Amino acid sequence: ATSRERPLPGGDVDADHKRRAALAQRFELPLETIERLWSLCGSRVEAICDEAAKCDNADWRTPLSGTWLPRGFARWVIEHEWVSRLDDLVERRLMLLYEPQLGEACLRELAVLLVAAGKLSAEAIDDEVNRTSARLAEHFDKRVLAQSSAT
């Protein structure tokens, strides 16, 4: 059969949208969050969210400061995607480089998650946040929003 007679894999846009909407409802996340997670990891999003929910029932859905990204997803990526540095996590694994509201508070939260996973020492948080902010500015002209005095 030709592709005129059968849909190509991933070509059923309505079915894909329905699947993502069902995942948003199941995991009690905004559809936009599921859509963005889907763009990062495709159909693996369901298994990843399942695992994140089991590991961290309390706040896995809570977004990191100034982002759409659930804390539990970031934790899963740190534990399963060979992350060793904050800049790698922000630039390549989570693609937060493109997040307009990326701020210092988010970088600090991610650094704390790296500490919890044994990938960074607590004493290195400030240096890692500063180094990542400087790298984003120098290499990508990305300005990280300063942490407000209220946080």
Image (tube, rainbow, N blue to C red):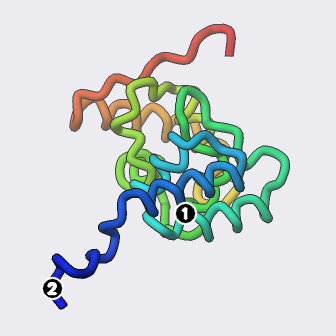
Classify residue 9 by image quadrant.
bottom left
Give the percent coordinates (x, y) of residue 130: 45, 31
Task: Residue 45: give its label.
Answer: 1
Residue that sits furthest to the top in the current view:
149
Asked whether the viewer can see residue 31, the reply is yes
User: What secondary structure is marked by label 2?
Assistant: loop
Report whether 132 appears left or right of 146.
Answer: left
**Which residue lies under the disc numbered 2?**
2
* Amino acid under disc 1: Val
Q: Nearer the viewer, residue 114 or 69?
A: 69
Label 1 sits on a secondary structure element that is helix
120 over 61 or under it: above or below: below
Name the amino acid, label 2: Thr
Q: Residues within 10 Å of mark 2 (few under 14, many from 20)?
A: few
2 vs 1, front mark? 2
Between 149 and 18, the one nearer to me in the picture? 18
Question: Relative to 60, is 77 above or below?
Answer: below
Q: Find residue 123 and report its image quarter.
A: top right
Percent x, y for residue 151? Answer: 68, 16
Q: Residue at x 62, y 50 (%)?
A: 24
Picture quadrant of residue 93: bottom left
Number of numbered discs: 2
Give the position of the N terminus as an image quadrant.
bottom left
Cα distance between the residues tagged 2 and 1 = 31 Å
In terms of sequence position, does the residue under pointer 2 or pointer 1 come before the other? 2
Residue lying farthest to the right in this orientation = 58
| Horizontal arrangement in the rendering, residue 79 relative to residue 128 (left or right) | right
Residue depicted at 23% across the width and 35% down the height:
140
